[in-house]
Image: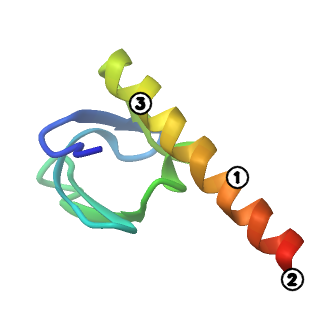
């Protein structure tokens, strides 16, 4: 799921806009005094980031669920 240009909120940094996304990283532009911050994708959405767009948020929850299932399967295989 491409989140580029989506608006997000962070409890400390406030509102921001996703400016780029890679497989495991997401880069967000916050207000000028805060600047650009990078987060681990999709993990940061469990604790720090919230999507402003509800449709995007639902899709993101599916990504998080899928990642958790993959981790559980890997742990069971070990």
Judge from the rendering whether residue 18 lies leftward or rightward of residue 74; answer left or right: left
The picture quadrant where one finds residue 25 is bottom left
The circle drawn on residue 9 is: none
- The residue under the point 22% across, 46% down is 2
Looking at the picture, does residue 6 appear above or below residue 66?
A: above
Q: Secondary structure at mark 2?
A: loop
Cβ–Cβ under 8 Å for marks 3 and 2? no
Q: Which residue is mark 2?
A: 78
Where is residue 1 drawn, in percent x and y?
Answer: 30, 44
Q: Which residue is mark 1?
A: 69
Lower position in the chain sequence, tag 3 or tag 1:
3
> Along the line of sight, which residue is nearer the eye, 30 or 74?
74
The picture quadrant where one finds residue 52 is top left
Where is residue 26 drawn, in percent x and y?
Answer: 30, 60
Lower position in the chain sequence, tag 2 or tag 1:
1
Q: Which residue is mark 3?
A: 59
Of the two numbered discs 3 and 1 in the rendering, the one whose residue sits closer to the viewer: 1
> Along the line of sight, which residue is nearer the eye, 61 or 72?
72
- The residue under the point 30% across, 20% down is 53
Label 3 vs label 2: CA separation? 29 Å
> Along the line of sight, which residue is nearer the eye, 30 or 49?
49
Judge from the rendering whether residue 33 lies leftward or rightward of residue 47; answer left or right: left
Judge from the rendering whether residue 10 lies leftward or rightward of residue 48; answer left or right: left
Label 3 vs label 1: CA separation? 16 Å
């Amino acid at each position: 799921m491409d989140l580029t240009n989506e608006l997000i909120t962070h409890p400390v940094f406030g509102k921001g806009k996703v400016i780029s996304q890679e497989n495991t990283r997401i880069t967000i532009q916050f207000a000028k005094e805060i600047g650009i911050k990078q987060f681990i994708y999709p993990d940061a959405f469990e604790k720090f980031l919230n999507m402003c767009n509800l449709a995007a948020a639902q899709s993101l929850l599916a990504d998080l669920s899928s990642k958790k299932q993959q981790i559980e399967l890997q742990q069971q295989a070990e």
